[in-house]
Image: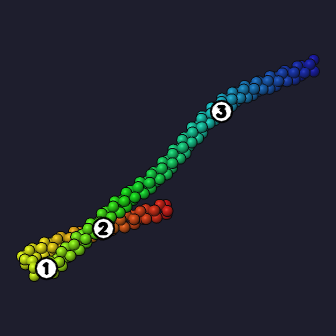
Amino acid sequence: MALSSSFQERLEQMESTRNQRLSLLQAEKELQTSKSKMLASKLVNIRSMEQRCLVLVHKIAFQNFKILALKSEIESLDAKYDAYSQIFRVLKSEAFSENVDKFVKESRIQVKELRNRVNELNSIFIKLQENNGRDDKIATFAVKENLDTSLASNYQLRSQLQKELDNVLVIRNQEGRKLELKRMERLFR
């Protein structure tokens, strides 16, 4: 019986060890289950964050696309502005040139008319001098004064027209220089 009691004890001890091990295994199993649930929860959170990141990346890409589209539109508008500015400058220059040419032609016509008038008056004056003995000296003097007045007026008008022509040519040269400077600036941009 002694054998059976020690055997019994040994069985009880083994049973107790087995129960302890089962208990430990059960606790380990619960711990693993808890860790699995926690990992699953963290995985869900990570996937949720990844989804939010993807949405943000999509929004950033869309904003970048909009920015590029706006930059392209700005460049297009700048190019149109430059083209229209050039057209405006050319038209303005052409109109100015036409006005200068018209003024020069009119001035030349007036100068020619004045020369013709001076020549005509000189011719009359010479004829009057030739007919000095026959004509009345008072009439000759009056014609001479009229001629002098007309000549002085003609010279004044000629001087004024020459000054205006010089001013127009100076302005034209300045406009030409400005256009040339603007062209050079555009080339070096």
Any part of residue 31 in sight: no
Q: What is the number of the mark on residue 104?
A: none
Q: CA distance from mark 1 to mark 2?
A: 34 Å
Of labels 1 and 2, earlier in sequence is 2
Residue 14 lies in what quarter of the image? top right
Which residue: 33% across, 67% down?
169
Of labels 2 and 3, earlier in sequence is 3
Q: Which residue is denoted by mark 2 in the rendering? A: 108
- How crowded pointer 1 is (Cα within 10 Å; few <14, some 14-19, many 20+) is rated as few
Considering only vertical position in the picture, is 183 above or below 5?
A: below
Residue 188: x and y in percent read 49, 63
Q: Is residue 147 left or right of residue 161?
A: left
Q: What is the number of the mark on residue 131?
A: 1
Locate the N terminus and report the quarter of the image it occupies.
top right
Q: Is residue 60 left or right of residue 27?
A: left
- How crowded pointer 3 is (Cα within 10 Å; few <14, some 14-19, many 20+) is rated as few
